[in-house]
């Protein structure tokens, strides 16, 4: 573990990492609507949810995997098995998802990645098949790539940003909007990859949502 301030057929097993697409997991949220329970530490299949999200990125072919931490970051480091991940601290996590996206993108230069696939820790219904589809669709375009999973035609997560876009996305990422404003301005360049047949894009936001975790 290191630290730093037409869709293809779903794979039958873990996809082979290309080394060109890094996984970027946003896992800094404090779970305000969950009574202040950090989302990274919610229990899923007996382990912290952040471990599940990292595994999905790896099985989808992303390497290396960067994990942005914020709320209860020290506890996450102590309790979760995040070997071989690059952990990125976001001291401004309370400002919203945009701050985590900025922190994660700032850590990528020098990694050798030509693109980053961004996933959210609180979407356990998005599995490796969706990650692999978006990664494959965007990887061919290299640093100029923009791609996103779609659910019945509506853009969702994960999303892939080629390196040419990192600075522009970081400059526009504020509050909880993340990259939405940038993607709207570049909508014609975004390759939408239908994933509704292999994934469910629900969020774990409220106590009622916890029933979706095993």
Image (cartoon, helix red, strand yellow):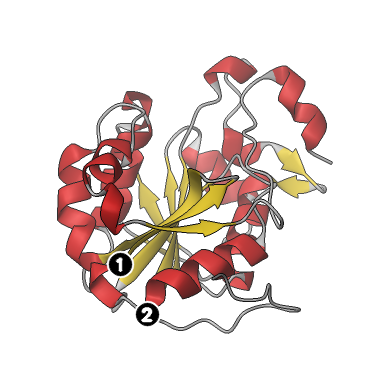
* Quarter of the image with the C terminus in it: top right
Whether residue 18 is visible = yes
Front in this rendered view, residue 148 or 72: 148
- The residue shown at (24%, 43%) is 182
- The residue shown at (32%, 58%) is 4
Numbered circle sitting on residue 140: 2
- The residue shown at (49%, 75%) is 136
Mark nearer the N terminus (2 vs 1): 2
User: Is residue 200 shown above or below 37?
Assistant: below
Question: Disc 1 marks which residue?
Answer: 145
- The residue shown at (23%, 49%) is 186
Q: Are marks 2 and 1 in contact (CB under 8 Å)?
A: yes
Residue 63, x across and y down, in percent: 47, 74
Residue 213, x across and y down, in percent: 78, 38
Q: Is residue 35 left or right of residue 32?
A: right
Question: Which element is circle 1 on?
Answer: loop
Q: Quadrant of residue 212?
A: top right
Whether residue 90 is visible = no
């Amino acid at each position: 573990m290191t630290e730093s301030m037409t869709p293809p057929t779903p794979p039958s097993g873990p996809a082979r990492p290309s080394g060109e697409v890094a996984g970027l997991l946003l896992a800094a949220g404090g779970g305000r609507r969950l009574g202040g329970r950090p989302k990274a530490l919610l229990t899923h299949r007996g382990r912290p949810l952040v471990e599940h999200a990292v595994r999905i990125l790896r099985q989808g072919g992303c390497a290396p995997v960067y994990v942005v931490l914020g709320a209860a970051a020290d506890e996450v480091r102590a309790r979760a098995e995040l070997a071989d991940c690059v952990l990125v601290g976001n001291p401004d996590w309370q400002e919203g998802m945009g701050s985590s996206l900025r922190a994660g993108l700032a850590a990528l230069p020098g990694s050798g990645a030509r693109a980053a696939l961004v996933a959210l820790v609180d979407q356990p219904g998005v599995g490796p098949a969706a990650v692999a589809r978006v990664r494959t669709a965007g990887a061919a375009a290299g640093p100029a790539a923009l791609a996103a999973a779609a659910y019945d035609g509506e853009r969702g997560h994960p999303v892939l940003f080629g390196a040419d876009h990192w600075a522009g996305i970081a400059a526009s990422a504020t509050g909880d909007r993340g990259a939405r404003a940038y993607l709207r301005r570049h909508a014609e360049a975004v390759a939408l990859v239908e994933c509704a047949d292999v994934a469910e894009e629900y969020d774990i936001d409220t106590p009622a949502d916890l029933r979706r975790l095993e």
